Amino acid sequence: MLQTTIIAIRATIVTLVITGIVYPLIVTGLGQALFSHQANGSLVKDEQGQIVGSALIGQNFAHPTYFWPRPSAAGEKGYDATASSGSNLGATSQKLRDRITADLARLTEANPDAHGPVPFELVTASASGLDPHLSPAAALWQVPRVARARGVAAERVRQIVEAEIEGRDLGVLGEARVNVLALNRALDRRFGRPDLHAER
């Protein structure tokens, strides 16, 4: 019995060292050596080297001079990376219907020159509430509003959107998409940063 217990303790210690210390150190080391940017959160920095966000985490852009992301139910005010979640409201929820109806009215009023109906993803939150991407169609739908707010030709804004479209991973995985943070940074680089305190 004692010998069996000693063997069990020894096996437990060896397994703990291998799986709890050695393996994590190797994986962390390889991640830092081969994929440092991704391993450290895919952080995005501005021209001064200040972190402005992560390419993997959506954030709220509410000013009309920027492209707006999907709605978020993560946290009390949305876009809270420490409270990633969906709303858990079902299709029969009156609260969800009221929110979508209000969002449709707001988006339509803010973008009267848009072609076609509001893309569904602009009124539906992702499961995480932190999706950083839009479909090209949802980004292009917003072009008239952004162009008008910035006082530039819509075609110039459209060209920026088209330049920021990311294709499928490895050519087959996922769908074409546009990272909202990258797109809005590209707008600022091309046209300058707007005065966010000006009247909307």
Image (tube, rainbow, N blue to C red):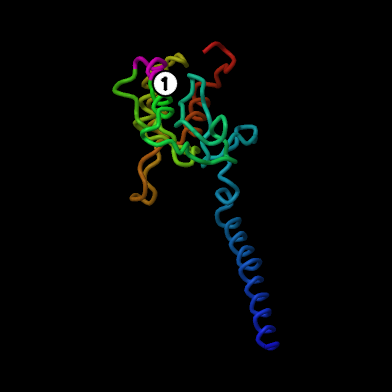
In the image, the segment drawn in magenta is 105-113
Q: Quadrant of the N terminus?
A: bottom right
Residue 107 falls in image quadrant: top left
Location of residue 26 in the rendering, given as x and y in whole percent from the top left corner: 61, 65
Q: Residue at x 38, y 22 (%)?
A: 101
Task: Say what amino acid the circle numbered 1 marks.
Answer: Ala
Q: Residue at x 58, y 61 (%)?
A: 30
Crowd tier of the residue under label 1, counting other residues whose Cα lies within 10 Å: few below 14, some 14–19, many 20 or above: few
Q: Secondary structure at mark 1?
A: helix
**Magenta span includes 97:** no
Q: What is the tally of numbered marks visible in this picture?
A: 1
Q: Is residue 66 left or right of residue 7?
A: left
Q: Is residue 116 left or right of residue 80?
A: left
Q: Is residue 3 above or below residue 156?
A: below
Residue 91 falls in image quadrant: top left
Q: Is residue 184 above or below residue 4?
A: above
Q: Main secondary structure of the magenta part?
A: helix
Q: Is residue 117 above or below residue 43?
A: above
Location of residue 135 in the rendering, given as x and y in whole percent from the top left corner: 37, 35
Which residue is outermost to the left? 116
**Magenta span includes 106:** yes
Location of residue 190 in the rendering, given as x and y in whole percent from the top left corner: 49, 25
Q: Which residue is mark 1?
A: 102
Which one is nearer the viewer's eye here, 174 or 120? 120
Q: Is residue 139 left or right of residue 80?
A: left
Which residue is outermost to the top? 199
Q: Is residue 29 above or below residue 128?
A: below
Q: Is residue 131 left or right of residue 17?
A: left
Which one is nearer the viewer's eye here, 183 or 95? 95
